[in-house]
């Protein structure tokens, strides 16, 4: 019986061998993740060509949101800029058109107001038949509003 248990138990590994095995496994996992990530990007670019991409940017009147909008404009995407300050949005919209956006819209929207969110959704459904990409670059808690508006039990 004792000899059988010795045969079934795994051999004792040196700590250095365990470290090496863990390092190889980690490198393998990173390599697989990078391959999958690059494939996903290629597939998305094929699925939605840059010039046909419909992008909604929440918080695009200044800062990072505006810069993101300008990058999408360089790619020729259709861009909907939203934020609370319409004058700044209109200026960003003009820049996007200059840079090559195939369409650019500026819509005043407060991300914390459920009615504003629904109006933007309806506007984009009407003009673009939906959206491919959403970039939210504001710090607003909209979850409770969205759940309330879409909850049929309310």
Image (cartoon, rainbow, N blue to C red):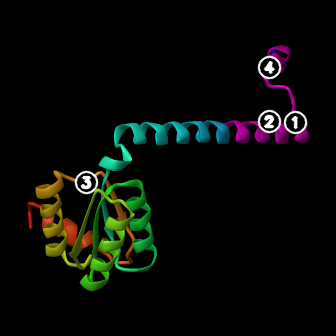
In the image, which is nearer the foreground, mark 3 or mark 1? Answer: 3
* Label 3 Cα crowd, 10 Å radius (few <14 / some 14-19 / many 20+): some
What is the CA distance from the residue labelled 1 to the residue labelled 2?
6 Å
Q: Which quarter of the rendered picture does the C terminus lie within?
A: bottom left
Mark closer to the chain start, 2 or 4: 4
Residue 131 badge: 3
Q: Are marks 1 and 2 in contact (CB under 8 Å)?
A: yes
Q: Please indicate, yes or no, whether residue 59 appears anywhere in the rendered image.
A: no
Which residue corresponds to mark 2?
21
Which residue corresponds to mark 4?
5
* Label 2 Cα crowd, 10 Å radius (few <14 / some 14-19 / many 20+): few
19 within the magenta span: yes
Q: Please indicate, yes or no, whether residue 25 appears anywhere in the rendered image.
A: yes
- Mark 4 secondary-structure assignment: helix
- The image shows residue 133, relative to residue 117, as above or below, that is above
- The image shows residue 35, relative to residue 132, as above or below, that is above
What is the CA distance from the residue labelled 4 to the residue labelled 1?
23 Å
What is the CA distance from the residue labelled 3 to the residue labelled 1?
51 Å
User: What's drawn in magenta, residue-wise?
Assistant: 2-28
Mark closer to the chain start, 3 or 4: 4
Q: Quadrant of residue 68?
A: bottom left
* Label 1 Cα crowd, 10 Å radius (few <14 / some 14-19 / many 20+): few
In the image, which is nearer the foreground, mark 2 or mark 4? Answer: 2
Which residue corresponds to mark 1?
17
Image coordinates of residue 77 in percent, x first then y, are 34, 55
């Amino acid at each position: 019986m004792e000899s059988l248990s010795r045969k079934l138990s795994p051999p004792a590994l040196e700590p250095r061998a365990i470290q090496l095995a863990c390092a190889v496994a980690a490198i393998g996992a990173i390599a697989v993740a990078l391959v999958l990530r690059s494939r996903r990007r290629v597939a998305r670019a094929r699925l939605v060509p840059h010039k046909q991409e419909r992008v909604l940017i929440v918080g695009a009147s200044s800062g990072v949101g505006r810069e993101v909008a300008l990058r999408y404009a360089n790619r020729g995407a259709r861009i909907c800029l939203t934020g609370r300050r319409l004058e700044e949005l209109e200026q960003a919209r003009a820049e996007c058109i200059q840079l090559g956006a195939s369409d650019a819209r500026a819509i005043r929207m407060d991300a914390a107001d459920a009615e504003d969110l629904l109006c933007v959704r309806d506007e984009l459904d009407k003009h673009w038949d939906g959206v491919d990409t959403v970039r939210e670059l504001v710090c607003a808690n909209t979850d409770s509003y969205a759940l309330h508006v879409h909850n049929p039990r309310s």
